[in-house]
Amino acid sequence: MLLAEELTIRESRRIKAALQMARLSVVKTLSGFDFSFQPSLSERLVRELASLRFVETATNVVLLGPPGVGKTHLASALALAGMEAGYSALFTTLSQLATALDAPTARGGRYGRLQRYIRPHMLIVDEVGYTRLSAEQAHQLFELVTARYERGAMVITSNLSFAEWGGLLGDDVLATALLDRLLHHAEIISINGRSYRMRERMAADTAERSASGVGQKLSAVTDSTSQ
Ligand code: ADP
Ligand code: MG
């Protein structure tokens, strides 16, 4: 029993350390994800990903969709599942990554700077699309994707279509070469649904309006205009 307890403590310590190393911005789980809210998303596919075979096979996961549909939630949940299973993970946003890749060359040169992002079993790059990269940053990102190609899984979230990556990288040829490697072994998941944030927002507004009686007046207005 003591041994079992010791193991549990070590295990939770290990996961805690892994969480800190991973720099997860939020801790989200798959069990906290409401699949019924996002019918365009295949629950079966997400559960299959959570089996983490994609980490073994160095398959990338690309989560696409507008804001609020749960891309960051799912990416974090996959990272957490991976760490619980003993894989190393690193979570970053594209803008953080771009800044890090641009930093003055450290000891070990350019490759040394990339190592931190090459080493983990899972590299999560969140929010691809809000940052426009410099030529140097675009080149470094290409180097990173090339280094991880067929060696380590990446989980990427984006609100951009792949056709827009040329603009993001400022170079169509580079974007094509990068996407070629990134998407060769990849699971692409498009979530075309409503924003969960807006749902929460609208629920709050409705509660507020009905509390102040505005809701009744508003619905009276909509009723009369719809006639
Ligand atoms: P995105 O990265 O696509 O913009 P997020 O993953 O940040 O969206 O989701 C926004 C917020 O809504 C987060 O707090 C997230 O946990 C929550 N959320 C999104 N979709 C769901 C869902 N289907 N079930 C439960 N919570 C969700
Ligand atoms: Mg997000």
Image (tube, grey):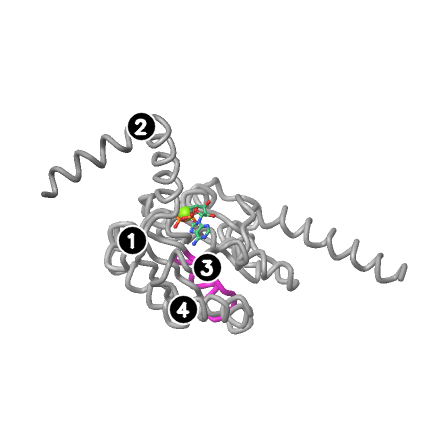
SS for tag 4? Answer: strand
In front of the other: 174 or 86: 86
In front of the other: 213 or 180: 213
SS for tag 2? Answer: loop
Q: Which residue is mark 1?
A: 160
State the CA–CA distance, disc 2 to disc 4: 48 Å
Which of labels 2 and 4 is toward the front? 2
Which amino acid lies under the numbered mark 3 shown in the image of this protein?
Answer: Val
Residue located 47% across and 63% down the image: 147
Relative to 28, say whether 52 is above or below: below
Residue located 56% across and 50% down the image: 108
Residue located 68% across and 49% down the image: 16
Closer to the N terminus: mark 4 or mark 3? 3
Which amino acid lies under the numbered mark 1 shown in the image of this protein?
Answer: Leu
Instruction: Determine if the magenta segment contains residue 152.
Output: yes
Q: Which residue is mark 3?
A: 155
